[in-house]
Amino acid sequence: MSYLVLARKYRPQTFGQVIEQDHVTRTLSNAISSERVAHAVLFSGPRGTGKTTVARILAKAMNCKQGPIPAPCNECRSCGEITSGHAVDVFEIDGASNNSVDQVRELRENVKYMPAHSLYKIYIIDEVHMLSTPAFNALLKTLEEPPPHVMFIFATTEPHKIPITILSRCQRHDFRRIGLNSIIQHMVYICEEEKFKISDESLALIAREATGSMRDALSLLDQVLACFKDSVSHDQVLDILGVIDRKYVFDLCDTILRGDISAILNMLDDSYNRGHDLKKLYTNLLEHFRNLIVVKIGQNISKLVDLPEYELKQMDEQTGQVSLAALNHIFDYLYREGVSIRLSTDAKLALEMAFIRMDQIKPALPIGVLIDRLDHLRQEFYNQPESELSNRKPDVKSETHAPGRKAGKRNSDAPAEPAHSMPVAPAIADNFTENLDVIWNQLYEIIARENPSLGASLSKCRLKQVTADSIEIEVHANGFTLNMLQREKNKAVLKIICTEYFGKDVDIVLTTHPETDAESPKKKSQNDSLLKQKAISHPRVADAIEIFNGKLIDVKIL
């Protein structure tokens, strides 16, 4: 067949023509110039990034008539044979079909012989990770100490499958994915050479489908060029390749951001009727929202989003009126639905259900916003900020006075009087002791009404003693409750209420009931033993054992 596909026709023939692998080509060129080329080299990286191409260029550079030289002449016999693929001293071996130990043994026997007319006998093994473990083991010694006229060049897309014993004997070079703009520029050059007209939008679409592989991009471009003679429109490219238009993804994203569920379902139905792969659409949409978040953040956009400039501008406009939290909510939901969509036998139905549920689930507010709203609600409830509540002066106005209580005007900054009147201390003599329960019940009602959380903490407390300038509250709960009551904010509120109730400034003293103190383990164990002994010696237990001829196994304390 006389026709050469674009990937072969425009294959780079020198290190300088290799696209976006300067870190590899520069190292190899310097190694050749300084005569420090390793006898075993490993090229690893994604498909279509130039591993085999660089291996051939390196072979030409080492066997060139003028070489070894960093820039092969591509005119001598050795360069011509390597370019055409039938060089007698350069062996290209497919690791997938030559992976047995017998084939490696044959290679090991052949390396003894000198090259036919070149400086080096070079073995290029592609997809070397496909060799079997015995084959790798058979290659170890030869790879470590080959004859001076032998060189090995390995290429693989999965270096993690190569034994570490092989990796340690090779000089490794990692190839990178080729950038979108570099692929587009190379295709522009090829289209000019082929005298074919195609829009930049179509080339960008092809480059995106290639996902960093130049060979994939040129294969798709070859398919487009084969269908039309001189030019092609963008719609025709979409029909030929069967890919989803980027404009469609932008439009669907706009519809999602508007929350128009009816329009979303219509667009999904149109895409399904056109024969698009809806799972691929989901992947494109997920990637698009990820890129929108990066654009919204606004840092390192050109590095993190590999897209043409005009698409970046469209994304910037698309995120103008949308918050970062809303974008993150949609991206997080779509990402979590990924498993069900990818594994579903009906991708259309899975996508429709995902968008319907997403429309019903409203974005959650950030925790900071929720706290601010709760604080605002509390301030409205008390009709003043919390700071004013804690600093309020105990100036009270009342028509009925408890013993020692003085009438006065309420501070103008204090909260408004409730609809009901404040209960007052009962008319008692100098001794409060006989009416402590009555006083506590009234105080507790006021506290529970004005501060429910504080009232909950005081539910298991009692008023133990009232003196001329203080009151003592006994806590019958655990240590957590005592710590809550001892907080400055709670003590301040409690003091304000008690000062208003008694009509004078009083101090709050908190004590614990002896029974609430945690028992020591030793004391608890002694009590348990006494209880068990008492149960065992109980007459009814003894009668039950005798009547049923039973046996006492264990005594449990509930």
Image (spheres, grey):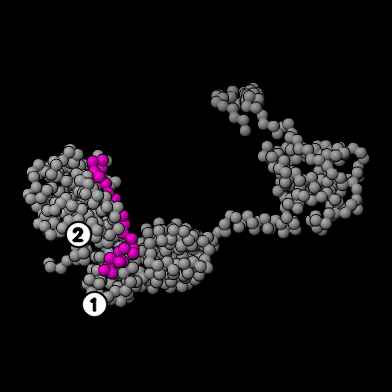
Region rendered in magenta: 166-189
> In the image, which disc is placed on residue 272?
none
Left or right: 450 as drawn, with respect to 311: right
Marks 1/2 in contact by CB < 8 Å: the verdict is: no
Left or right: 141 as drawn, with respect to 369: left
The residue at the point 83 percent across, 42 percent down is 506
Residue 187 in the magenta stretch? The answer is: yes
Left or right: 536 as drawn, with respect to 71: right
The residue at the point 13 percent across, 53 percent down is 66
> In the image, which disc is placed on residue 13?
2
Residue 490 in the magenta stretch? The answer is: no
> In the image, which disc is placed on residue 230?
1
Residue 148 seen in this snapshot: yes
Residue 273, horizontal then vertical, whole percent: 35, 73
Density class for disc 1 (Cα within 10 Å; few <14, some 14-19, many ≥20) is few
State which mark lies toward you, 1 or 2.
Answer: 2
The residue at the point 71 percent across, 57 percent down is 379
Q: Count the marks: how many?
A: 2
Camera-side residue of 403 and 186: 186
Q: Quadrant of residue 534?
A: top right
The residue at the point 7 percent across, 50 percent down is 117
Q: CA distance from mark 1 to mark 2?
A: 28 Å
Quarter in which the N terminus is drawn:
bottom left
Left or right: 160 as drawn, with respect to 88: right
Residue 301, horizontal then vertical, whole percent: 43, 60
Q: Quadrant of residue 345?
A: bottom left
Residue 131 seen in this snapshot: no
Q: Earlier in the sequence, mark 1 or mark 2?
A: 2
Three-letter code for the amino acid on which mark 2 is drawn: Gln
Camera-side residue of 73 and 134: 73
